[in-house]
Image (spheres, rainbow, N blue to C red):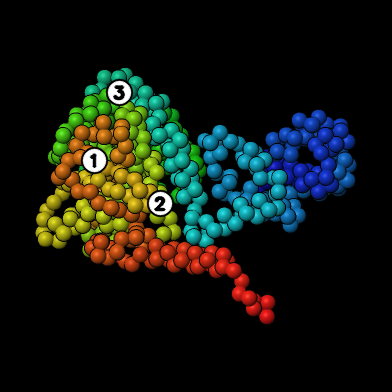
Amino acid sequence: MPANADHLRFILGLKLKHERLERGLSLKQVAEAAGLSISYLSEIEKGRKYPKADKVLDLANALDVPFDDLVSLRVGQKLSPLKELFSSHLIQEFPFEMFGLEQQDFFGLITEEPGKVGALMQTFVEIGQMYNVSVEHFLFAALRSYQQMHNNYFPDLEEAAADFRKANDWDAPIGESRLANHLREVFNYLLDYETLPADADLQSFRSVFRDGEQPVLYINGELLPEQRAFVLAREIGFRVLDLKERPTTSSWIRAESFDQVLNNFKASYFAGALLIDRTLFREDVASFFDNEQWKPDALEQLVERHRATPEMVFYRLTELLPELFNLEDIFFMRFFNERETDYTVMNKVLNLSEVPIPHGIGMDEHHCRRWPALTLLKQLRLQQSNGSAHQHPSALAQRSHFMGQDTDYFVMSMARPLSLSPNTNSCVSIGLRMGKQFKRTVKFWNDDALASRRVHLTCERCPLSPAECRERVVPASIYEQRIEEQQKQEALDRLFKQALPADAST
């Protein structure tokens, strides 16, 4: 990788600290010998400062190290793993500032034992490569962590959407045509609804953005009106928030930087806040929660009232439930299922709960069929195989006792066919921990008509026997392996506690 200023500062600081510690010298001793202040030398070692050539020479003399060795990018064997780590695309792109750190802060934490820690960190990078964990995975994981830190609620984006709606005198819900006209008239956009669905290689994209003197937004005309409205609202978000570094496609091919990932999130959050007004949505959700009985139709009406898809409404709930209803322990999941098979993929998750929901990276396990999302997908698949022309979302709720954490969650799910993939069904779920605040807020939580089921993450990890779980699709291989390992460990513990036989020395 080409040397940049950050790279040069870090390598010099790494070498200086390594040489100083090798000689058992303190910061004060080296600083005095080189005619520098202790604080300035500390900044150099942390990679924050790069001294002039004469000061580098003074440091070389103080440490009895050749000047050329200090300024060269070459490092010794002990420091090589740390240099490779710093040079990696992952570290160069990782958004340390989102967590109140700078790159130099991170490396300052690990340079006390640079050889050991560098090798350890490099091992993590190699493991990621071995399991095909790309830089994009790390960047999206960083974004999820950022959302979790803020309970997925961002007042500045909420206010930006509210201010925009007020400035344009728009009442919610906002129609697709109003959004399209705004892009054409205010931002000089050309909107193309025909190109994507007509191209076999592009028809899976919801939208593609082409920059230029007149920006072009290619929108897949096969999308539902609610989906097209979201694409348009997100595009307005990029403009209103002045987010210049951005992806060009609706679904990711490759994330070029964390700024792209973050800006796409901001524009999407803006779109959700613009289309689903916070005040109106709060009133409707409160009314829905006030029902004494679980009513699937009431959830479907909530979605229809805001002219949204189930995914848009469920994701909006993750943004507003913690802030407006004090329901913080929640999770969101989205599953896809091909109609011809029972194989289900979780391809989107936001976890603000204690449930250790797997992200699916490098994991070929079978999700527990007892969660309502997978139950709904199975029901939808059976309806379709019997010739049903079902197209509308169907809803299901259940009280789920998660055995892995011994915790109860109330889970609501909605399933529907995908508009761009006729042979694929999608189901979104939101789970809320059934604590005191939840039971005070959601009146229908104890509806006798609702199922209460024990669930786990995957079949492979579940302790239920086949007799207890008819939905099991594969054996509990991981659970059984852990039980076997536990039994061996207990046997060893018993062995070591026994008194030695009388003839043990013969």
Outermost residue toward the front in this view:
502
Q: Earlier in the sequence, mark 1 or mark 2?
A: 1
Q: How many callouts does the rendering have?
A: 3
For residue 300, side relative to residue 41 (left or right): left
Disc ID at residue 309: 1
Secondary structure under tag 2 reads loop
Marks 3/1: CA distance? 21 Å
**Nearest the camera: 282 or 65?**
282
> Label 3 belongs to which residue?
165
Q: Residue at x 24, y 40 (%)?
A: 309
**In the rendered structure, which amino acid carries the disc numbered 2?**
His
Q: Residue at x 31, y 19 (%)?
A: 167
The x, y position of residue 112, in whole percent, is: 71, 45
**In the rendered structure, which amino acid carries the disc numbered 1?**
Thr
> Label 2 belongs to which residue?
359
Secondary structure under tag 3 reads helix
The x, y position of residue 150, in whole percent, is: 43, 33
Quadrant of the image for the C terminus?
Answer: bottom right
Q: Residue at x 35, y 48 (%)?
A: 406
**In the rendered structure, which amino acid carries the disc numbered 3?**
Arg
Q: Earlier in the sequence, mark 3 or mark 1?
A: 3
